[in-house]
Amino acid sequence: MAEMVAMRDAYGQALVDLGQQNERVVAVDADLASSSKMSMFEEAFPERFFQMGIAEANMTGVAAGLATMGFIPFTNSFACFATLRTTDQIRVSIAQPKLPVVIGGAYSGLLGGKTGKSHQAIEDIAVMRALPNMTVVAPGDGVEVRKAVFAVADYGAPAYLRITRDPSPIVFDESYDFKIGRAVLVREGSDVTVITTGIMVGRAVEAAELLAAEGISLHLLHAHTVKPIDVAAVVAAAERTGLVVTAEEHNIIGGLGGAVAEVLGENRPTPMKRVGVADIYSESAANDDLLQKYGLTAGHIAQAARSLMERRAAHTQP
């Protein structure tokens, strides 16, 4: 069984390690440091930790001000608040002037630990992706979180970093070269391509095993950076199999599925299916129940792949 690590734990430790290497890194919180694990940075560097209270808009403005003074601010709140409650401040104070602020979105997606549907962020990628100058990164496991923290700090531009709450499988090892904007080939296959972002990569690996038992070869590409998306890698993956499934813990509108559809529509029209939340607001429940109800399990990814293959077979029959 794969090792399980919570992204928020990896995030907190990565911030501490980054802070030890770079004195310009500061943390700005909205009363959720214990949940996001930014509290680890607070304990290590209290003089570089700024508590704004339940005031995300103010947190965002303070971070922008710190960036103008040469600091590298990481803000943090639940993803729904970090991106939606503060959209205007991010747009005007961070994105337009291209300030190097990292917006940390904790508890992203559906699995927020029964915090309720108001706390589930399924629109955040779409909103952040629509802002000019904004980079959007959704790591797939604890290893990628650590690499992403260091990468966005060094990027010198506005960035949204999407972090999940609960333990998830480790998919990657420490040796792989993480680069913003470059997708990662997880598994080579020949029958159907699955492109993931965020936590769905682990479920796609499981789906690949399910399909392999049926003689179906899945080609798995992980797009940890949704913006700028790796156009060349997406097109190459589509050309390899001629069928594409996207998988994300996010609304199917405006997120990874939309980004991939845009790329393929302009460069290589390809039959595709989007696995994600089907443009509805979700409920609060146990993780497994939510994944099953909203179609985000490994089984749903596998079924999307099968349906594309069946469609192609029907169209090629004499």
Image (cartoon, rainbow, N blue to C red):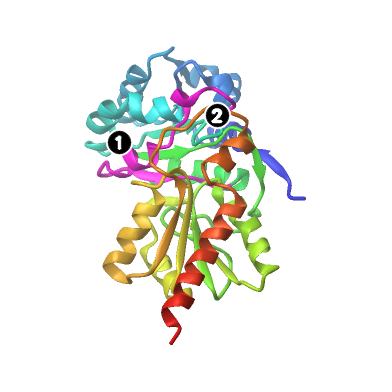
**What span is in magenta?**
113-140
Rounded to the nearest whole Å, what is the CA distance between mark 1 and mark 2?
29 Å
Marker disc for residue 279:
none
Residue occupying the far top of the picture: 53
Left or right of 88? Residue 201 is right
In front of the other: 22 or 169: 169
* Mark 1 element type: loop
What is the quadrant of residue 52 in the picture? top left
**On residue 112, which mark appears?**
2
Q: Toward the viewer: 131 or 200?
A: 200
Q: Position of residue 255 (x, y in %)?
A: 38, 47
Q: Nearer the viewer, mark 1 or mark 2?
A: 2
Residue drawn at (39%, 68%) of the image: 271
The residue type indicated by label 1 comes to Leu
The residue most toward the front is 318
Q: Is residue 165 above or below residue 217?
A: above
Looking at the image, can residue 84 be seen? yes
Q: What residue sits 61% from the left and 52% below the top?
A: 298
Q: Is residue 66 visible?
A: no
Q: Earlier in the sequence, mark 1 or mark 2?
A: 1
